[in-house]
Image (tube, grey):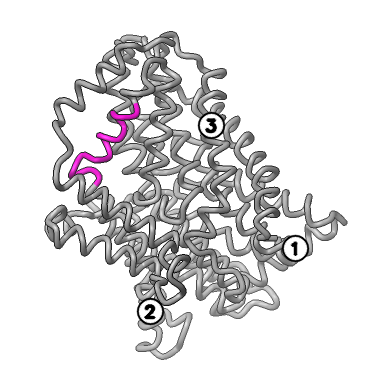
């Protein structure tokens, strides 16, 4: 009947109105900043409650900022402010990368890579698990939709293999291998998301918020992020299948038929196609340019902006016919991401410009400072509070937009090295995806296959979050020290 869900919409609207009209504007806060906060919290509540699709909520947010004039009393300038983030290159980097990732699915290259690994390492169930991990790792740099990667490309392969061994939740045989493989399939997703800026849509938002909080003193490039996350990420990927194997051991441990199954699938696919080769070549070009290899060899004149690189990759796929313009027009997730990303970045930017983030981070900093702790335990407390607050969020983007800037700024005020705290908070922004069956888009896809009970999902999620954050704090911290990042 309506274009919105009445109860979540009423709750979001009530929260916004209470902040705007009932709660007094705190001392030291501008009324415009407080009113923008009211709209911002209402938008986040609507996203969490799924009052409408996130893109529709974003359009409403843009309209509200423009019509209320909270950023500028001039109507024309207020509209310009509301639309300002559509010119943000980071937003287009993710949108274009999602479009590029369509080529992995259309050509079948993503599935081919998965079956190739299983054909080699699939003689044991744990070997199949590591094959899934390797596939995730290879696809992550050019698949910013972690849902498409883990749920759209990898999970159908997992289900096909589990079915071939009669591991079916409807028959009560999920413990044969389906449960274990599904857990590995899912938990590889947050780790690879943490390893590359282009591995999940919210990562560029983290880059943007860090730059704003440090007045652009820290600008995380694609290479800087990838090198920083490489060692702790790889260690997490190595340990994760072993931890889950210990927690939920599969009944079927030897899988000689899996290699034959994978080989049969590869035979059905036939020889690698012309379009797959082109996709592979574009994949290589993207990685080389994002990593800055030409600039390293030939000098700074060969530097190519990360977003320009993404546009180049998409143009090559269009020119060669791997993708058509109709393919791009049907990429609803890409256009949706550009829309909601622009709206949330815009609101977060003006909350910062109007001084509200500084005010809130000051409150956090002063309250923690009263404990008399050094920066290490103080910032550990901030990071853990930020990470485990994700139990209350069904969107990583909403969580990052709502909390990252204030918690990061408070950490800097408490004396944390800016680069170290930026990287550990960036890692936590992906690790928090492990926690619940609604934590990110991938989770309901895999949880919905019914191989894993709710209790098992939450238990595995909490254990893996502890293991991974410890690895990133200690091994990551030492690695970043060796790299001279802090």
Comparing 361 with 71, the one in front is 361
For image coordinates 54% across by 23% down, the residue present is: 242
Q: Is 157 left or right of 379, judged from the image as shown? A: left
Alpha carbons under labels 1 and 2: distance apart: 32 Å
Q: Is residue 447 above or below residue 252?
A: below
Q: Alpha-carbon neighbours of circle 3 within 10 Å: few (<14), some, or many (≥20)?
A: some
Q: Secondary structure at mark 3?
A: helix
Range drawn in magenta? 104-117
For image coordinates 52% across by 19% down, the residue present is: 245
* Image spot of residue 195 (x, y percent): 50, 48
Is the stretch drawn in magenta largely helix, strand or loop? helix
Mark 3 vs 1: CB contact within 8 A: no
Assess whether residue 111 is covered by the magenta stretch.
yes
Q: Is residue 477 above or below residue 350?
A: above
Q: Which residue is mark 3?
A: 238
For image coordinates 43% across by 33% down, the residue present is: 133
Q: Which residue is mark 2?
A: 66
* Image spot of residue 260 (x, y percent): 26, 16
Q: How many marks?
A: 3
Q: Which label number is shown at residue 148?
A: none
Alpha carbons under labels 3 and 1: distance apart: 37 Å
Q: Is residue 289 above or below residue 177?
A: below
First reached walking from the N terminus: tag 3 or tag 1: 3
Q: Secondary structure at mark 2?
A: helix
- Whether residue 343 is visible here, answered yes or no, is no
Q: Secondary structure at mark 1?
A: helix
Q: Which residue is mark 1?
A: 365
* Image spot of residue 21 (x, y percent): 54, 71
* Image spot of residue 214 (x, y percent): 62, 72
For image coordinates 32% across by 67% down, the residue present is: 59
């Amino acid at each position: 009947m309506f274009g919105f869900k009445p109860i979540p919409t009423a709750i979001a609207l009530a929260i916004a109105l209470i902040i705007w009209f009932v709660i007094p504007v705190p001392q030291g806060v501008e009324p415009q900043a407080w009113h923008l906060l009211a709209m911002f919290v209402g938008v986040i509540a609507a996203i969490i409650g799924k009052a409408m699709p996130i893109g529709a909520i974003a359009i409403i947010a843009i309209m509200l900022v423009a019509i209320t004039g909270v950023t500028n009393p001039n109507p024309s300038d207020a509209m310009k402010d509301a639309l300002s983030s559509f010119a943000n290159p980071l937003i287009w980097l993710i949108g274009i990368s999602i479009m590029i990732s369509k080529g992995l699915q259309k050509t079948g290259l993503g599935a081919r890579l998965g079956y190739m690994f299983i054909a080699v390492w699939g003689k044991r169930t744990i070997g199949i698990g590591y094959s899934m991990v390797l596939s995730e790792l290879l696809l992550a740099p050019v698949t910013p939709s972690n849902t498409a990667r883990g749920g759209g490309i990898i999970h159908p392969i997992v289900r096909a293999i589990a079915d071939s061994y009669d591991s079916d939740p409807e028959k009560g045989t999920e413990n044969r291998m389906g449960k274990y493989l599904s857990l590995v399939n899912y938990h590889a997703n947050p780790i690879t998301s943490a390893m590359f800026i282009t591995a999940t849509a919210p990562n560029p938002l983290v880059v943007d918020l860090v730059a704003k909080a440090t007045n652009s003193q820290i600008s995380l490039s694609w290479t800087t992020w990838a090198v920083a996350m490489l060692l702790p990420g790889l260690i997490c990927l190595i340990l994760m299948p072993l931890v889950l194997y210990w927690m939920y051991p599969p009944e079927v441990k030897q899988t000689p038929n899996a290699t034959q199954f994978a080989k049969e699938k590869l035979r059905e696919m036939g020889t690698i196609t012309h379009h797959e080769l082109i996709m592979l070549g574009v994949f290589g070009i993207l990685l080389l340019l994002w990593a800055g290899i030409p600039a390293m060899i030939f000098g700074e004149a060969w530097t190519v902006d990360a977003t320009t690189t993404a546009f180049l990759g998409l143009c090559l796929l269009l020119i060669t016919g791997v993708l058509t313009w109709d393919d791009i027009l049907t990429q609803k997730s890409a256009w949706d991401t550009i829309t909601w990303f622009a709206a949330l970045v815009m609101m977060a930017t003006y909350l910062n410009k109007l001084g509200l983030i500084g005010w809130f981070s000051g409150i956090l900093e002063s309250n923690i400072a009263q404990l008399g702790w050094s920066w290490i335990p103080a910032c550990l407390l901030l990071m853990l509070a930020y990470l485990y607050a994700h139990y209350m969020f069904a969107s990583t983007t909403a969580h990052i937009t709502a909390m990252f800037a204030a918690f990061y700024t408070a950490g800097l005020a408490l004396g944390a090295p800016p680069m170290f705290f930026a990287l550990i908070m960036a890692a936590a922004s992906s690790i928090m995806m492990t926690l619940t069956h609604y934590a990110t888009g991938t989770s309901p896809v895999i949880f919905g296959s019914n191989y894993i009970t709710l209790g098992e999902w939450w238990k595995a999620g909490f254990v893996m979050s502890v293991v991974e954050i410890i690895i990133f704090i200690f091994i990551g911290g030492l690695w970043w020290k060796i790299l001279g990042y802090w």
